[in-house]
Amino acid sequence: MNPRTLRRILFVMLLGVLLYGGFALWRGVAEMHAALARFQGMAFVLACALAFGNYVLRYFKWEFYLARLELRGIAKRDSFLTFLSGFVLTVTPGKVGEVFKSLVLFETYGIPVARTAPIVIAERVTDLLGIIVLIVLGSLGFRGGLAWAGVGATLVLSLLVVISSRPLSHAIIGMLQRLPGPFERLGPKLHDAYDSLAVLVSPRNLVFPTLLSVFAWSLECLALWVILRGFGETVSVALSTFFYATSTLAGALIPVPGGLGVTEGSLQGQLLELGHVGPATSTAAMILVRFATLWFAVVVGFVALALLKVRYPRLMAAVATDTEKAST
């Protein structure tokens, strides 16, 4: 990984520390300490386990897409570690940095990045669909909840219309090619990437990955519920699902690194106003669930990358060179 990318990750981590510190000061350090003092630590461990379950289910989606693109011969262990390595850059806007795993796959198996990069987009599409399903389920009997689902569904369906329409997509790519600078050179690569993406988001390839997304993200919704139970709160599973899913959707739609600030503010606000969780407890629960999901994922990504480095000693140098070329 090149130094510039590493600096960006460290910067976002520092930003996260400052953000959570600001929340703590806002709610009162003494009150936060009192809330954390009564927290049952095993709840955090279970929340991390649920988050890892999310990663495992989403790995099966990664394998599904590789099979649909007829990319075979990849050892399952390498495929799993490659998938997890993408979490190193999960704090990038929209998680687009997860295309890093396509670079890893290129360096380890020689598969062109343009073949697998569309998987990242397909993953985001099916993740959004899964999140919307969870919002709908969590909003049943909750006044105003279905309005959130309607807004998100409209945005995702609009995206699907563009992707599923080959003439419309090629027209957009054609317009990009006519722009000055690097866009002209990217045109052919975008056409190749779209051809792969069109296969991945065809109706017959949407159902199974979307179901996997529903089950995968429901585990992280449960992680929020578990953490709230660790504080002795009695917020229902349905409300926990609604709170976590809507906050995740908000963070995904606004292009900030890892949804930082957006997801936290939405989640803490909903816990406070709609879940009737006390100010200090709602802030502490928000911080813990973000550590158990977002930041735990970054740690898992670094561990997976380290294990791949053991198997492929020249991997990091090669990926760093490719990343630097791609950024120039």
Image (cartoon, grey):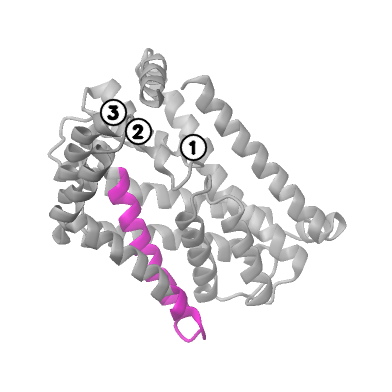
One can see residue 326 in this view: yes
Q: Residues within 10 Å of mark 1 (few under 14, many from 20)?
A: some
The residue pinned by badge 1 equals 300
Please name whichever residue, 211 or 110, is drawn nearer the observer in this view of the structure: 110
Q: Magenta includes 133? A: yes
Residue 318 in percent (x, y) is at 36, 16
Mark 3, residues whose alpha carbon is within 10 Å: few (<14), some, or many (≥20)? many
Tell which tag, 1 or 2, sits nearer the viewer: 2
**SS state under label 3:** helix
Q: Amino acid at mark 1?
A: Val
Magenta segment boundaries in residue numbering: 120-148
Residue under label 3, please give it: 105
For the point 64% across and 58% down, the residue is: 286
Magenta span main SS:
helix
Residue highlighted by disc 2: 101
Instruction: Identify which residue, 68 or 233, lies in the foreground.
Output: 68
- Which numbered circle lies on residue 156? none
The first of marks 1 and 2 along the sequence is: 2
